[in-house]
Image (spheres, rainbow, N blue to C red):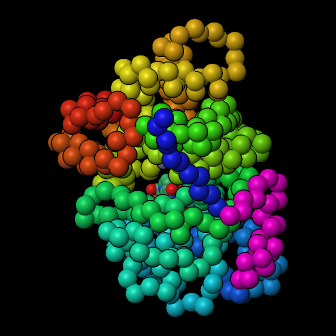
Amino acid sequence: MKVENYSLKMPKAVFGGVNSLEKIPQILAEAGAKHVAVFTDKSIKGAGLFTLIEEQVINSGLGYEVYDDLPAEPSYMQVQENIERFKKTTADFIIACGGGSVIDSAKLASILLTDEYGVKELLDEPTRAKNCAKILAVPTTAGTGAECTPNAIVGVPEKAVKIGIVNLNMIPDYVILDAKLIEHLPRKIAASTGIDAMCHAIECYTSNKANPFSNTFALEAFDLIMNNIEKACDDSTAMEEKNRMQIAAFYGKVAITASGTTAVHALSYPLGGKYHIAHGVSNAMLLIPVMKYNYQDPQFQKRLAVAWDKAYHGDKKFEGSEQKAHALIEWMSSIVKHLDIPGDLKEFGVDPKDLDELVTAGMAQQRLLVNNMRTLTDSDAKKIYLEII
Ligand SMILES: NC(=O)c1ccc[n+]([C@@H]2O[C@H](COP(=O)([O-])OP(=O)(O)OC[C@H]3O[C@@H](n4cnc5c(N)ncnc54)[C@H](O)[C@@H]3O)[C@@H](O)[C@H]2O)c1
Ligand SMILES: [Zn+2]
């Protein structure tokens, strides 16, 4: 019998639901925190979300300082600049309040606080750094799931790509999923980050690395996303749907940590690195072309059929895997269109002459491409990019 190994890695404690932000003083006390560093950014502050955290830190009676200079989707140098400032601090506990960009930067800071080297060195030797400050992640988007992974993604401008640094010490110690944080998330961001979560769920479920742990979380995430994403994005008062999206984003990322994403994420990375297209937007563009490419594999169809049975709660009846898989791709496509995410690269100034360079950069993401059920060649990747260029 073939023995398979798989593992589940998660934050130590997760607090969800109404007013879970009020847990902050208790978390700080339990962790023995003495001084707090709050990582955030200007948009989060502008949206009034930092104040919600600040109130709770003040309630805890601890001193705190704020790091809010981070741009969205930062390069490793920009993350390092922040860390240099942070190294002069006496803070021993980090609260990261923001989207994936802020959370990833804070996670890197939490393992580099006392080290001589920096993020650049971790690009080559990611496991070198050890945990030196505890961290609470409070996500303000529902998509990246950065609050539960050992990954931090940084731009590497000289290579025109984004690179994921993976180090188990970066799994946040604590997470709070409070829908208040995404109540006024602009629709555009809610849509792209929500589709990112959809990609995590369906890619993990169809990954060559899928296993019982990842399947459980991926299917639950997929069901929640397919049935809540539109209302959560369209209706600012839909707090239940928004909370379900937060839970789904979290589940989707637990699934990734146990399995892995596939060709959507692999081909998406160069678009973020070189053209600074938001991660969820480039994933949304590639999702349907990659699903259609994989559809030619009967095993892939079978997996999509299971995902259809799990997520679809309406009256349509299909018998075979082929029909269910087809219907599921159509459903995902209709959601992407409903959310008004750009369907191609036209508005991003991508020169068709860059196509070969894109293919090379996309195909270099073998870490993820080996997870894709249907093998991709350079010419397959080129055809997929051509569909969106
Ligand atoms: N670590 C991981 O596991 C992982 C996984 C996927 C992606 N990522 C990375 O995460 C980053 C993307 O993260 P993201 O999609 O969450 O977006 P983001 O953090 O880049 O934020 C996008 C913009 O939205 C603003 N914003 C966020 N929440 C808001 C809110 N509630 N109200 C108003 N404005 C708000 C931010 O200030 C920012 O300007 C990328 O760098 C990506 O590569 C990390
Ligand atoms: Zn992603």
Residue 12 found in image quarter: bottom right
Location of the C terminus (image quadrant): top left
Compared across the picture, whether 44 is left or right of 294 comes to: right
Q: Residue at x 55, y 58 (%)?
A: 149
Q: Position of residue 368 (x, y in %)?
A: 37, 46
Q: Position of residue 228 (x, y in %)?
A: 68, 35
Q: Position of residue 134 (x, y in %)?
A: 63, 76
The image shows residue 356, relative to residue 86, as above or below, that is: above
Residue 191 found in image quarter: top right
User: In this figure, what is the number of numbered marks?
Assistant: 0
Residue 31: in magenta span: yes
Residue 161: in magenta span: no
Can residue 263 be seen in this snapshot?
A: yes
Q: Residue at x 49, y 41 (%)?
A: 3
Q: Residue at x 41, y 75 (%)?
A: 128
Q: Residue furthest front?
A: 1
Say which of 332 and 297 sits in front.
Answer: 297
The image shows residue 240, relative to residue 324, as above or below, that is: below
Q: Position of residue 308 (x, y in %)?
A: 59, 23
Can residue 236 be seen in this snapshot?
A: no
Magenta residues?
Answer: 12-33
